Amino acid sequence: MTDPAQLQRNHAAHPQSASAGGTSRTPLSRWTVPVVVAVVLAAAVVVLVVLWRWIDGLALADPASKDKAAAQLDAVKIAASLVVSGGGVFALYLATRRQRTQELELQVRQAELAQRDRVQAHAEQVAETNRVHAEHVAADTRLHAEAQRITELYTKASEQLGSDKAPVRLAGLYALERLAQDNPAQRQTIVNVLCAYLRMPYTVPDDRPVDDVEEPMIAAHRERMQERQVRLTAQTILAAHMRPGPDGHNPDVGFWPGLDIDLTGATLVDFDLTGCRLGNIRFAHAIFVGHAGFDEAEFTRLTTFKKALFSGSAGFRGARFADDVGFDDATFGGVAMFDGANFDESAEFSRVRFGSSAVFGEVHFNADAVFRAARFGGNAVFKRARVAGRAVFSGAHFLAHARYSEVSLGRAEFDGVSFSGRAEFDRARMAGFAVFEKAEFAGVAVFVEAHFAEAAIFSKADFAGDAVFRLACFAGNVVFRETAFVSIAAMSQAKGRVGIRQDVWPLGWTMDTTDRIADDLSTRWRRVVPVPAVPDVLERSV
């Protein structure tokens, strides 16, 4: 690194080497002026003598004539002029030399100033470089010290989690929470540690043993109860920092955004993420003991509950799933409440087992909703649900009441579905194909005021109870081929669009080919009317 003081010393020792061009002038000798004066005078004298002799040598008639005197006077004038001219030339030379010297001195001065400025700028640059380097060294030292401190705290807290004493484990949890709160860059790592702790094998304690049992059993139960408190604390820490607070646009200071949670295979007790905003969530094979609360939660990325077990009730009311979600092969032992939830992408519920009621009232599925081969052990409520894509219930089993009143479905796939109880599709609107092929209705099937915008396919379906299609509207093709009705289907005041293909209407019904009606959209329709051959039976069924 260059020393500014050394540069200044070098410049002082060699001032002219730093000047532009390195120009210098030798000073005049003290004998220069006298010599020049003598030379000029001598030249004047020589000229005067020469001219004087030349005049004397002229053949003038009278040496004392006026012409000779005038000529001699002119010679003196010429000599004097020569002296004056020589002096003037020398004076002009001196003036020119003085001006040139001054110009060179000015150039040297400017060069010295420029060199001084360069030396000063270089010195300032060196000082700034040294300052920045010192700051970087200090910052690196602080970062190293901070990283070492974080590592020590993290290591200590992790060691506490491995203690066999519950209070020490609790202290480790709170230490990790404080560390994550103060160091945002460490939050995902610490959340991973908490999730890993919850994924460790755990047996939920039974009721407290009686007093006369052996002490080892009492001690084991006490240890499980203490571990329960530790796990509840870990769950509470996770939930507390996943909640943005009442104002989602201005989250609370304690909110940890954008973090992923992996609780695959974990045993979770009374797990509550109500109102949380979550990233990637993995609950595959997880066991939820007690109530599992996800009401008003926001799942911003991929979410999976594949093969999860909910032993108690599960609440997803008002929850929002922004990405694909999978509940396939999950088991709900208690009531499953999804009413008011919103699914922005596909929702997978294939082979789900609902042991009690499943409530999907006013749920919005903005893509496909797949319940293929699902089993509903209690009432299934989809009242006013909206499915923008395919509603797939193929092969599902409804063991109790299935209520689809006022639903709005895209393509409705209920082929091979088994309805053991009452099935209600009153005022349902199906915008795509409605497929009920080989469906089994053991109880009453209600399609009052249902609207089928495309083909309605009930071929090979089995209606063991009453089938009520009163006021239903069929805008597409109608297929009841090989459909079995235990009693006559009730289709009074139903209507079909003019021009649709009618493979087979239910026994005792057909379309009126003579009478046409129009709705508000001027679409031409025909009424579904009884076949004249069986009027008495039809009146009783209606």
Image: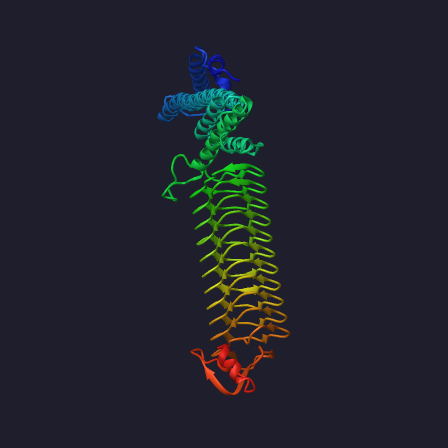
In the rendered view, tell whether residue 86 sits above or below residue 522.
above
Q: Residue extending furthest front?
A: 212
In the rendered view, tell whether residue 265 sits above or below residue 163.
below
In the rendered view, tell whether residue 399 sits above or below residue 64.
below
In the rendered view, tell whether residue 239 sits above or below residue 129.
below
Q: Residue at x 61, y 69 (%)?
A: 461
Q: Residue extending furthest top?
A: 30
Is residue 57 visible in the rendered image? The answer is no
Residue 383 % position (x, y): 46, 61
Residue 226 % position (x, y): 49, 27
Pick the residue in front: 6 or 264: 264
Residue 210 % position (x, y): 50, 28
Residue 217 % position (x, y): 55, 25
Q: Is residue 513 left or right of residue 62?
A: right
Choose top left, top right, bottom left or bottom right for residue 242.
top left
Choose top left, top right, bottom left or bottom right for residue 44.
top left
